[in-house]
Image (cartoon, rainbow, N blue to C red):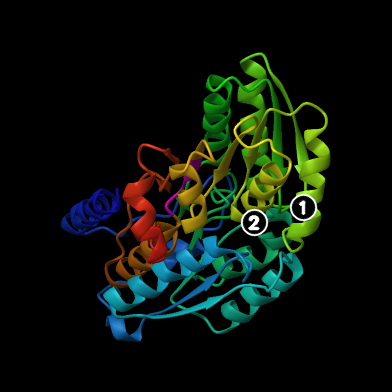
């Protein structure tokens, strides 16, 4: 999948170069055209290009370490300078300040995740108004256009959650629980909504359980308490939720009786799928979410080219027991 996406990007960029016209950012309504003005008239040396990345990823989340691996690899491959910053906890005030600080330095491109457009919108729009090309990753597929961004790299979260719900329903789940470890992140809300909509459509019921990503013991206790209401299927929204959920099922003797699925991959998640402890993991290939925007912004700065279409999907895909062994090694290397 990685090679296919890279090849696709290369083909699109090559086609754009042959037209001799700079690509335009995705815009709707009165979205500011400042990003379009940032497209260069002629090629710029790569070693002078500086790109800033600001995400909401918490330091304790292995998911975001893989994103950063992609960022670092792309910076090396492209020969550009990249900075990466994130708040230590899920803190939108701190994240907006990080974005403001990077905008003040006037980078050649900015990569951001957008878990809360109301909290981050002002800072992101300031970047666009300053003529800085901006690409969103991971969360933001529903708002990147209205903010005037060039494009979004990631998956559409509602559809990913809906697919997870369909798999749970097909496995016989009738009473589902969506464990949200990052309350306030609109992407997580969309995942749970899609999941519960699919379960409900199949004739089941479900609810959302909010837990604290920074307190796995408390998360486990809350999941254990929720199981008492007859839950027979759990979807967690990432490793910070799947770990406590799996521990709860094991300690309570419910492993195998309650179906468990999760978003995102770690070596532990993949081992659990391989061993039959988890039904599946929804893979959004976060390495590409780090890698591709650096390539895209580097090429945009040099040649003014950009893929058409607005959203460059990196997922969703599903890893099951049949495919887990194939990606375990790459996950241990920080790529999957």
The answer to whether one can see residue 211 in this image is: no
Residue range corresponding to the magenta coloring? 281-285
Residue receiving disc 2: 240
Instruction: Assign a secondary structure to mark 2.
Output: helix
Q: Is residue 53 above or below residue 332?
A: below
Spot occupied by residue 122 in the image (x, y as percentages of width and height): 69, 64
Left or right, residue 110 beside residue 295:
right
Q: Circle 1: is it few (<14), some (14-19), or many (20+) Cα within 10 Å?
A: many
Tag of residue 83: none
Task: Examine the image and state in which quarter residue 189 appears.
Answer: top right
Q: Which mark is residue 219?
A: 1
- Cα distance in 3D space between marks 1 and 2: 9 Å
Disc 2 crowd rating (10 Å Cα; few below 14, some 14-19, many 20+) is many
* Callouts 1 and 2 close, C-beta under 8 Å: yes
Up-down: is 122 above or below 280? below
Residue that extends furthest to the left in the rendered view of this protein: 18
Helix, strand or loop for the magenta stretch, by majority: strand
């Amino acid at each position: 999948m990685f090679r296919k996406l890279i090849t696709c990007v290369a083909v699109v960029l090559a086609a754009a170069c042959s037209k001799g016209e700079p690509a335009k950012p995705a815009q709707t309504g009165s979205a500011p055209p400042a990003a379009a003005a940032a497209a260069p008239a002629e090629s710029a040396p790569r070693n002078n290009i500086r790109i800033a990345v600001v995400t909401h990823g918490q330091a304790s989340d292995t998911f975001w370490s893989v994103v950063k691996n992609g960022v670092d690899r792309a910076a090396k491959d492209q020969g550009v300078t990249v900075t990466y910053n994130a708040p230590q906890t899920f803190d939108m005030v701190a994240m907006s300040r990080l974005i403001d600080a990077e905008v003040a330095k006037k980078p050649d491109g900015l990569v951001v995740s957008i878990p809360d457009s109301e909290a981050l919108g002002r800072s992101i729009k300031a970047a666009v108004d300053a003529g800085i090309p901006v690409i969103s990753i991971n969360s933001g597929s529903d708002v990147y256009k209205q903010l005037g961004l060039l494009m979004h790299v990631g998956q559409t979260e509602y559809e990913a959650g809906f697919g997870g719900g369909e798999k749970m329903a097909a496995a016989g789940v009738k009473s589902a629980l969506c464990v949200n470890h990052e309350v306030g992140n609109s992407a997580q809300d969309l995942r749970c909504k899609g999941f519960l909509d699919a379960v409900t459509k199949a004739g089941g019921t479900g609810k959302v359980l909010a837990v604290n990503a920074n307190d796995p013991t408390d998360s486990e206790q809350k999941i254990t308490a929720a199981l008492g209401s007859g839950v027979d299927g759990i979807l967690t929204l990432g490793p910070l939720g799947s770990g406590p959920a799996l521990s709860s099922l094991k300690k309570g003797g419910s492993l195998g009786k309650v179906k468990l699925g999760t978003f995102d991959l770690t070596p532990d998640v993949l081992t659990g799928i391989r061993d039959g402890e988890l039904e599946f993991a929804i893979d959004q290939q976060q390495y590409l979410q780090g890698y591709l925007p650096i390539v895209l912004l580097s090429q945009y700065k040099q040649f003014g080219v950009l893929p058409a279409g607005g959203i460059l999907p990196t997922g969703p895909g599903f890893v099951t027991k049949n495919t887990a062994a194939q990606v375990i090694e790459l996950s241990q290397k920080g790529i999957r």
